[in-house]
Amino acid sequence: MIKIQGIKKSFGSLEVLKGIDLEISRGEVVSIVGPSGAGKTTLLQIIGTLDRPDSGSVIVDGIDTSRMNERKLAEFRNLHVGFVFQFHQLLPEFTAMENILIPAYIAGKSTKEAKQRAMELLNFMGLAERATHKPNELSGGEKQRVAVARALVNNPAVILADEPSGSLDTHNKEELHRLFFDLRDRFGQTFVIVTHDEQLASITDRTIKMRDGLLEAQTLVQSVTDTGTEEDNVPETNNQQ
């Protein structure tokens, strides 16, 4: 689903990513963790084509994004990638439904098709009765669920989330974390989540640890085996020196 090879990125004299190789499978929920300055958000932005690497390649859903011009990249993001940020970034003058519809209209979908998809997502998230409410009439958790619905409206293959629960209280964090897995099971998306939240990282399919622009280690949470035991945090790789 996502194949990253030899990604390097510098800002001036600061080398942020020093050669990243990574593969993420379809339908996997992966967390990326590490200290501030490790390069987590930069890597996420490059996967999502919001930034270009200095060298290396990113292939998403079979498409080599390094071969695209800016117009093609914008089209690619709209159709293949959904973004969820720490702060919901909803447009305050629009209702929940209207905020969700924006990416669908950009993609050229008909009003009927777009509204049908948006309502499906609102129903799934228990927000159907809030469709006509503006962001200032929604709770923090509701705003973030609307932002997730907006990211999903075009049924992208990949959802990229940067500290998605960082601004939420404990109850809403737990609800949002469960939602990611429910959505994966329902719609089949691949989730890549940058987080400092240890609870979220502990329940993802795989945790990728970064430090100083390198992949430090990966841990895999395996499902219950035939013998009824469960293996957690099994070292999978330590492929960057």
Image: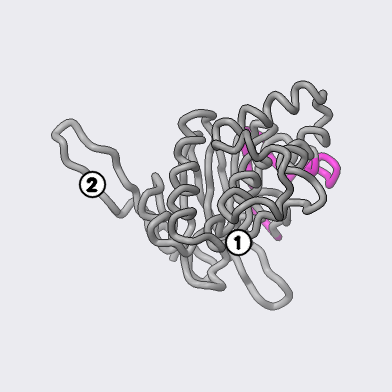
Residue at image location 63% in from the left, 62% down from the top:
42
Rendered location of residue 48, percent (x, y): 67, 48
C-alpha span from label 1 to label 2? 29 Å
Q: Quadrant of residue 198?
A: bottom left
| Residue type at the position of mark 1 | Thr
Rendered location of residue 2, percent (x, y): 56, 41
**Residue 144 visible in the shown view:** yes
Horizontally, residue 79 falls left or right of residue 58, namely right
Which region is colored magenta? Answer: 54-74
Horizontally, residue 239 falls left or right of residue 141, namely left
Tell whether label 2 touches label 1 (CB within 8 Å). no
Give the structural element (helix, strand or loop) at label 2: loop
Q: In which quarter of the image is residue 9?
A: bottom right
Give the structural element (helix, strand or loop) at label 1: helix
Residue at image location 63% in from the left, 36% down from the top:
129
Q: Among all residues in the image, which is located at the extreme left?
A: 227
The residue pinned by badge 1 equals: 41
The residue pinned by badge 2 equals: 231
Say if the magenta span includes residue 65. Answer: yes
Say if the magenta span includes residue 161. Answer: no
Residue at image location 56% in from the left, 55% down from the top:
164
Rendered location of residue 62, percent (x, y): 63, 33
Of the image marks 1 and 2, the number of the one nearer the N terminus: 1
**Quarter occupied by the N terminus:** top right
- Look at the picture and state if 114 lies above or below 141: above
**Residue 6 visible in the shown view:** no
**Quarter occupied by the C terminus:** bottom left
